Image: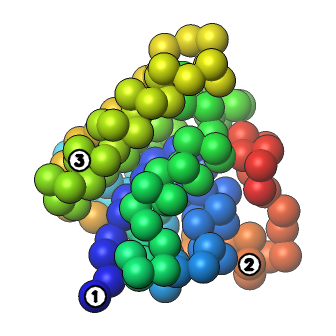
């Protein structure tokens, strides 16, 4: 049986690329979540006011890759201490967030955030929000697997890619 995980960690192109080729990840999709506008467009999210984050929905086989493994990737690919930004990208759509799909995911995400906060990796407090997954709005087709389609590298905010 597959499971779904949803992460926001800045520009969704680089976040998707970080998860897309992991063993056990069956599918990725970029989109918008965590806001109040129905069926937002990229332009609306960028203009702000929708409340949405750019996010990646990851469909995975938990027998091949655990949710904890996905959380480890999430912490590695961005700066979880930045509020409403990643690198040069500024705005609430670039916030750091974990959108959970079950009580087990919520508990794992909370424990993971506590462990990250207690590590010596960050000089500032962790800003990552953890909230239940809500409505999901798939981003426009040209955003899906952006780097794979364009032969690109990585977003500047994701140096580990």
The reply to whether residue 139 is in sight is no
**Which residue is denoted by mark 2 in the rendering?**
148
Q: Which mark is residue 147?
A: none
Q: Which mark is residue 106?
A: 3
Against 153, residue 46 (above or below) is above
Q: Quadrant of residue 90?
A: top right
Between 105 and 46, the one lying in front of the other is 105
Q: Which mark is residue 1?
A: 1
Choose mark 1 or mark 2, whichever is in front: 1
Q: Position of residue 46 (x, y in %)?
A: 50, 44
Mark 1 element type: loop
The reply to whether residue 131 is in sight is yes
Going from N to C along the chain, the mark reached first, 3 or 2, is 3
Q: CA distance from mark 3 to mark 2?
A: 31 Å
Q: Are marks 1 and 2 in contact (CB under 8 Å)?
A: no
Against 74, residue 66 (above or below) is below
Residue, far left: 103
Mark 2 element type: helix
Classify the position of the N terminus by image quarter.
bottom left
Report the residue at 51% width, 59% height from top: 69
Mark 3 element type: helix
């Amino acid at each position: 049986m597959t499971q779904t995980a949803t992460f926001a960690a800045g520009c969704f192109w680089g976040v998707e690329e970080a998860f897309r080729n992991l063993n056990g990840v069956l599918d990725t999709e970029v989109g918008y979540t965590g806001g109040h506008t129905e069926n937002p467009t990229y332009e609306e999210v960028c203009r702000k006011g929708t409340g949405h984050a750019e996010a990646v929905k990851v469909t995975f086989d938990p027998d091949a890759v655990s949710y904890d493994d996905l959380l480890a990737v999430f912490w590695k690919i961005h700066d979880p201490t930045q509020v409403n930004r990643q690198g040069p990208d500024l705005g609430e759509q670039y916030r750091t967030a974990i959108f959970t799909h079950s009580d087990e995911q919520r508990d794992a995400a909370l424990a993971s955030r506590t462990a990250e906060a207690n590590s010596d990796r960050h000089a500032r407090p962790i800003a990552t929000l953890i909230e239940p997954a809500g409505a999901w709005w798939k981003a426009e087709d040209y955003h899906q697997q952006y780097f794979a389609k364009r032969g690109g590298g990585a977003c500047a905010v994701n140096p580990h890619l």
